[in-house]
Amino acid sequence: MNKLSCVVLTSVLWSCAAPASQPQNDLLPSWNDGPAKKSIIAFVERVSKAGGPDFVDPAQRIATFDNDGTLWAEQPVYFQFLFALDRVKALAPQHPEWKNKEPFASIEKGDMTAALRGGEKSLAEVVAATHSGVTTEEFEIAVADWLAMARHPKTNQPFTKMAYQPMLELLHYLRDNGFKTFIVSGGGIDFMRVFAEKTYGIPPEQVVGTTGKEKFEIRNGKPVLIKLPEVDFVDDGPGKPVSIQKFIGRRPIAAFGNSDGDLQMLQWTCSAPGPRFCLFVHHTDADREWAYDRASSVGKLDAGLDEAIAQGWTVVDMKTDWKQIFEFAGNIQR
Amino acid sequence: MNKLSCVVLTSVLWSCAAPASQPQNDLLPSWNDGPAKKSIIAFVERVSKAGGPDFVDPAQRIATFDNDGTLWAEQPVYFQFLFALDRVKALAPQHPEWKNKEPFASIEKGDMTAALRGGEKSLAEVVAATHSGVTTEEFEIAVADWLAMARHPKTNQPFTKMAYQPMLELLHYLRDNGFKTFIVSGGGIDFMRVFAEKTYGIPPEQVVGTTGKEKFEIRNGKPVLIKLPEVDFVDDGPGKPVSIQKFIGRRPIAAFGNSDGDLQMLQWTCSAPGPRFCLFVHHTDADREWAYDRASSVGKLDAGLDEAIAQGWTVVDMKTDWKQIFEFAGNIQR
């Protein structure tokens, strides 16, 4: 075939791919047509309009998302902590010393009130003990097995079904418009990577989170990475911009969070010149999900809410902005 | 247009894109047709042949590259160290105390023999002092300015011209075949990110390196990240598989290095099941580049060379495998 006929065919064929007469499909069907949805679409169209004054090169279209409370639920408590509790029970036979050691003894007995008495230090101890002493590959299998079996205490759904439908649509919508989507979460990096690709379409190399120390070793002639019971870096609060710089190396143009732990990520994103977009998910739906903000022990949103109002960031009111919250139907609180 | 004519047109048009009768262009023109080039092409064709027994999903086609001595030269000394030396001179007016402090005093005087007397501890001190106390953005500008002005002491070329032409072709060839290319280097992550995208086509989020600690701060109402004079993680030797797990979260199927500092990265890559490819660049060309291996103080290749031979990894003999080494012509050693 000669070059000219190829060019002609290409132009004719173009009309198959993009019929100009049809209206564009709604790519955010679980969002009500309120100010939040409008602000998202306006921003995306602004930065992707070729030749427009606010056009952003696709390589710079970095969007970062918190995970707990932003992409999936975080009530009654962070799901990774429920994994840690189940793992204490699973590992107990290998740790007879836990029988006389708090908070492990109380967890084994199922007495959560006693288990939580030690506060954050206890919790950190539980996470360290249950997230170490294995190879990275063994840990991935443990998480995958747990996710396949475990059910949310309130909805009885697999935890990956606790992802927010409107946010899944938003992730797709951004990627369809040339954005590269990242998770930047206080959650454990090795934990999130097990489900992020399948659940959110975010590959492991775009998942940033809290890291534990790991060690390279040759075991029986085979190289392995061992997870150590020591925190490497906590990816929360002021740690989030630090992690963004370390892992991504450029400033996002859009950031999405739901708590004060995301405030610095949003400040870092939206304080630079050029078009920027910052959004907080505000948990306002006591029937279909949970309602909590300034006084919550999980996902507290207080200083962040003030700053969002002062800066004019988008605040999603879950109750009015989201048509549907989860893929499964029905209210959570009955 | 109806669906059927679109399908027909698409099949006809397909022949425009891929003319079956023409031979494939040589995508590695700076490589001689020796065993190294053959092994690369054989591997890439093996993993990308749809339906073949060794097909690897594109998402899993992760390739990691060391930088110094693998993608660009590292003689007479790591280029980043030359940057640090120039920066001591540039920063000296702000540091009167350096006049009486080694190794800074000797560097200012240009007496490198005296400056190097303190060994590695001194070198680390120079890097810490010259890579901290500024914001990440100020540091990026300093590196960019230096790269624009500085010249290699032997070739008088900009340092980015010291990239190896065959390796640039290899990076492109891999990406053309669905690979995602990463740098995993002992070099400073913030230093490399300044030129990696333009020089290698590798975006910041795919550059992994040694990290310094950084701190988020609000300065005059604006968030900044300050570089601290403290090492966070050294991405070398057994640190490389640890960094790969932390930053990428999956095991590469191909790894490229040139020194014992890359050995564990190659072991980690090539010890897993499935098709794997490991390659060492062996510096054998004393005329066109440099010849060094087992006894070199920079880029020592000793245990790595033994392991490569034992494991049957590809060893590039620069002298015989590379038709051209740099984009510029001529020998370096005259």
Image (spheres, coloured by chain):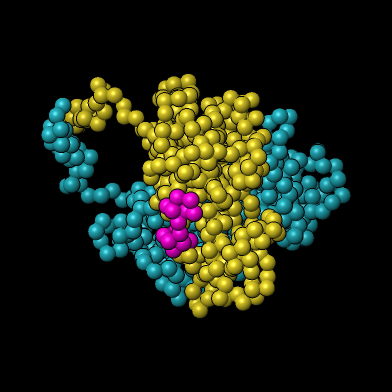
Chain colours: A cyan, B yellow
Residue A214, x across and y down, in percent: 68, 46
Identify the residue shown where x is 35% and y is 53%.
Answer: A58
- Please name whichever residue, A313 or A135, is drawn nearer the observer in this view of the structure: A135
Quarter of the image with the N terminus of chain B is top left
Identify the residue shown where x is 41% and y is 37%.
Answer: B324
Q: Is residue A236 left or right of residue A206?
A: right
Is A222 drawn above or below residue A182 in the view shown?
above
Q: Which residues are magenta?
A: B143-157
- Please name whichever residue, A92 or B85, is drawn nearer the observer in this view of the structure: B85
Identify the residue shown where x is 78% and y is 46%.
Answer: A108
Is B43 drawn above or below residue B289 in the view shown?
above
- Please name whichever residue, B320 or A3, is drawn nearer the observer in this view of the structure: B320
Asked whether the viewer can see residue A216, the reply is: yes
Residue B322 in which image quadrant? top left
Q: How many marks?
A: 0
Asked whether the viewer can see residue A305, the reply is: no
Q: Is residue B154 magenta?
A: yes
Residue A133, x across and y down, in percent: 74, 42
Residue A207, x across and y down, in percent: 53, 49
Is B168 drawn above or below residue A76 in the view shown?
above
Identify the residue shown where x is 41% and y is 33%.
Answer: B323
Q: Is residue B118 left or right of residue A328?
A: right
- Please name whichever residue, B142 or A56, is drawn nearer the observer in this view of the structure: B142
Q: Is residue B50 left or right of residue A225?
A: left
